[in-house]
Image (spheres, rainbow, N blue to C red):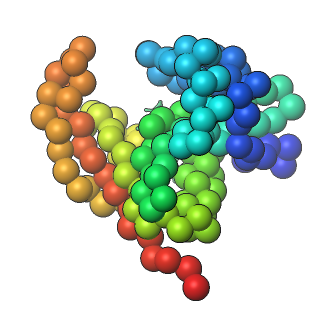
Amino acid sequence: MNDDERIVFLTPERAEELESLERSCFFHSWGREEFRQLLSGKNFKAIALTKTEGLIGYLSFMHVPDEAEILNLGVLPEARRRGRARKLLNFFIDYCRKNGISRIFLEVRVSNKAAINLYQSLGFNLAGRRTDYYPETKEDALIYELKLIKEG
Ligand SMILES: CC(C)(COP(=O)(O)OP(=O)(O)OC[C@H]1O[C@@H](n2cnc3c(N)ncnc32)[C@H](O)[C@@H]1OP(=O)(O)O)[C@@H](O)C(=O)NCCC(=O)NCCS
């Protein structure tokens, strides 16, 4: 990762940039208005890797007092395989530890080997499987979780 890249929490004003980044990373994206509303609320947050030209990767999540669910994690196709998703996840795990979150979980397509390798390499464990979870392909979802030990 380059020195001019940093991780920030996105504000509602950046909803359009987030929509555009999500479109570049996934087949389906939420709309900018949805993002604006979500980012204005309390339980949804998104962190993003930024550089001078704009956003290159992000991780969005929902959280309640002691649990967080990763909703999406994506890096621009041309910026992959250079440790950026790992950097975002490590930042996020650190944030969760500091904010009293004791469990992180997520769903991932069974075919998404890149993401599964990434989560496993950071200590996430398989916690369940949802059969035929994705309606368009009938693909199964795997649930991964990471339990955190409270600090202090
Ligand atoms: C999954 C994704 C976020 C990874 O981003 P990235 O910045 O390329 O990942 P990193 O460079 O930090 O890779 C970290 C580790 O993840 C695994 N990994 C990442 N891409 C991989 C690939 N194409 N094949 C196999 N393993 C891969 C490896 O273990 C890698 O470690 P290594 O490079 O030391 O081998 C990216 O491919 C992406 O945006 N994919 C499309 C969106 C998506 O599927 N998101 C996940 C939804 S659950």
Q: Say above or below: 52 vs 149.
A: above
Left or right, residue 92 beside residue 108: right
Residue under the image location 27 percent in, 47 percent down: 143
Out of 150 and 54, give the one closest to the viewer. Answer: 150
Location of residue 71 in the rendering, given as x and y in whole percent from the top left corner = 45, 37
Question: Is residue 46 something one can see in this rendering?
Answer: yes
Location of residue 77 in the rendering, given as x and y in whole percent from the top left corner = 57, 26
Out of 58 and 150, give the one closest to the viewer. Answer: 150
Left or right, residue 126 beside residue 149: left
Q: Say above or below: 142 vs 150.
A: above
Q: Say above or below: 100 vs 110.
A: below
Left or right, residue 21 beside residue 113: right
Out of 54 and 113, give the one closest to the viewer. Answer: 54
Residue under the image location 79 percent in, 43 percent down: 5
Direction left: furthest residue? 131
Counting the numbered discs, the total is: 0
Direction bottom: furthest residue? 152
Indicate the quadrant where residue 135 lies.
Answer: top left
Left or right, residue 10 beside residue 42: right
Q: Quadrant of the C terminus?
A: bottom right
Question: Is residue 79 something one can see in this rendering?
Answer: no
Indicate the quadrant where residue 103 lies.
Answer: bottom left
Out of 32 and 25, give the one closest to the viewer. Answer: 32
Location of residue 44 in the rendering, given as x and y in whole percent from the top left corner = 55, 39
Residue under the image location 47 percent in, 21 percent down: 26
Residue under the image location 49 percent in, 17 percent down: 29
Q: Say above or below: 19 vs 4.
A: above
